[in-house]
Image (spheres, rainbow, N blue to C red):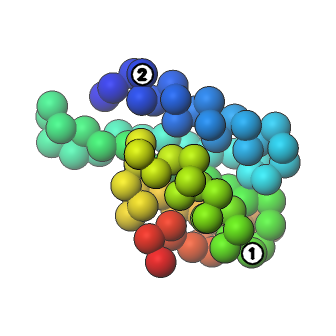
Amino acid sequence: MDTGVHELICERLESLKLRGAISDYFVAWRGPSGRLDPNVTIWSTSDDGEQLESELRWLLGELVLPSEFTVIAESNGTEIGRANR
């Protein structure tokens, strides 16, 4: 795990949390030893993930592969999007 990248991801997601765009997030690292990649789950305060996904691609684009973050609607716990769609 790259702690610098982890901290940067968290800083950017905290900015969304402070704005009220997301309620929470979870950053995990997956993959073979020595080649871990970040995987992010984000709980959205809105049921419409399109705007949030666009912002996530912009904020996290160089840090997290689009296929490695998932947006979940806080209201009902359903997945409302993946950034690579």
- Identity of the residue drawn at 84% across and 44% down: 19
Circles 2 and 1 in contact, beta carbons < 8 Å: no
- Identity of the residue drawn at 22% across and 45% down: 31
- Identity of the residue drawn at 64% across and 40% down: 13
Relative vertical location of residue 63 with respect to residue 10 in this rendering, above or below: below
Q: Position of residue 82 (x, y in %)?
A: 51, 70
Relative vertical location of residue 41 with respect to residue 32 in this rendering, above or below: below
* Amino acid type at image mark 2: Gly
Relative vertical location of residue 2 with respect to residue 40 in this rendering, above or below: above
User: Residue 48 got which mark?
Assistant: 1
Q: How many marks?
A: 2
- Quadrant position of residue 71: bottom right
Q: Position of residue 42 (x, y in %)?
A: 61, 54
52 lies left or right of 2: right
Residue 21, can we see it? yes
Residue lying farthest top? Answer: 3
Q: Look at the image and tell me in which quarter the N terminus lies.
A: top left
- Quadrant position of residue 48: bottom right
* SS type, badge 2: helix
Q: Nearer the viewer, residue 77 or 58?
A: 58
Q: Residues within 10 Å of mark 1 (few under 14, many from 20)?
A: some
Q: Earlier in the sequence, mark 2 or mark 1?
A: 2
Q: Which residue is mark 2?
A: 4
* SS type, badge 1: loop
- Quadrant position of residue 37: top left
31 lies left or right of 7: left
22 lies left or right of 38: right
Q: Position of residue 6 (x, y in %)?
A: 45, 30
From mark 2 to mark 1, how far is it between C-alphas?
Answer: 31 Å
* Amino acid type at image mark 1: Asp
